[in-house]
Amino acid sequence: MLDINKQEFEKIIAEALEGLPEKFKNKLNNVAIFAEDEPTDEQLNKIRLKRGDILFGLFEGYSQAKRLNIGPVLPDRITIFREAILSQSDNQAELKQKIISTVKHEIAHHFGSDEKGAAKAGKR
């Protein structure tokens, strides 16, 4: 299994964010992006997964489309999970591509995409 430390992993996440088109970067608001080794039990329960299932990333919060209909809320949270992505990456290039794809996928959820739309966004 490929291995990089959390700081290097976070650097690739930052690069993925920098690589987003300006029209998306300018609209990314009220969202915090984190890197964690693995999901918490609470996160797994929320999406009906069990420990050992592979989860690259998770969006938690209200999409921008839904946010229009509710009052002030805490920032949305996107978490990218290092251990899962590392376990599925054979080399540095593949690792970087999986991180970028996951960041795009979760940001698509932030903008209101369903799973099908987010999967499509992650492949762009």
Image: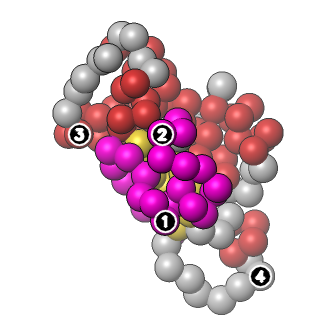
Q: Earlier in the sequence, mark 3 or mark 2?
A: 3
Q: Are marks 4 and 3 in contact (CB under 8 Å)?
A: no
* Helix, strand or loop for disc 2: loop
* Helix, strand or loop for disc 1: helix
The residue tagged 4 is 69
Q: Is residue 39 left or right of residue 6?
A: right
The residue tagged 1 is 42
The residue tagged 2 is 52
Q: Which mark is residue 6?
A: 3
Image spot of residue 49 (x, y percent):
60, 50
Q: Does the image show residue 34?
A: yes
User: Whole-Å distance between the Cαs marked 4 and 3?
Assistant: 37 Å
User: Whole-Å distance between the Cαs marked 1 and 2?
Assistant: 14 Å
User: Whole-Å distance between the Cαs marked 2 and 4?
Assistant: 36 Å
User: Whole-Å distance between the Cαs marked 1 and 4?
Assistant: 26 Å
Residue range in magenta is 27-54
Q: Local crowd at mark 2 within 10 Å, few (<14), some, or many (≥20)?
A: few
User: Is residue 35 magenta-colored?
Assistant: yes
Q: Of circles 1 and 4, which is in front?
A: 1
Quadrant for the C terminus in the image: top right
